[in-house]
Amino acid sequence: MREARGTSQPYEEGTATNPRLKALILEVVEDQIRASDPTETQQTFERLLAAGYSRKQAVEMIGSALVEEIWGMLHDNKLFDRGRFSALLEKLG
């Protein structure tokens, strides 16, 4: 087991989740919410809160959509697609 830089959580190399990467993704989501850019992130955040999800749950759910969009961009060698990202956000909750 090794310590992930920038976190206090232990990180086993065989695990599916990298706590440092998760923290960075959640930071991006928080920045998107704060800046309301893209606006769909802020709207989804408010919708999830209104549906009864906690702030932490809502941010993590949006983060999962963001990871899926990033993976698609890298895998398919495509640019960010706001429509595709919006569709992922609409599926949440």
Image (cartoon, rainbow, N blue to C red):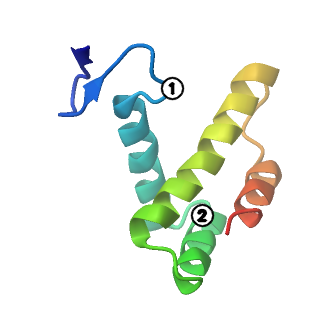
Q: Residue at x 24, y 14 (%)?
A: 2
Q: Which residue is mark 2?
A: 41
The amino acid sitting under disc 2 is Thr
Judging depth in this view, the residue of 69 and 15 nearest the camera is 15
* Above/below status of 53 relative to 6: below
Q: Secondary structure at mark 1?
A: loop
The amino acid sitting under disc 1 is Ala
* Above/below status of 79 relative to 28: above
Q: Secondary structure at mark 2?
A: helix
Q: Position of residue 33 (x, y in %)?
A: 48, 65
Q: Which residue is mark 1?
A: 16
Q: Quadrant of the N terminus?
A: top left
Q: How many marks?
A: 2
* Above/below status of 47 relative to 44: below
Q: Residue at x 39, y 13 (%)?
A: 13
- In the displayed structure image, the side of residue 28 where residue 66 appears, left or right: right
Q: Position of residue 66 (x, y in %)?
A: 61, 46
Which quadrant of the figure has residue 20? top left
Judging depth in this view, the residue of 92 and 12 nearest the camera is 12
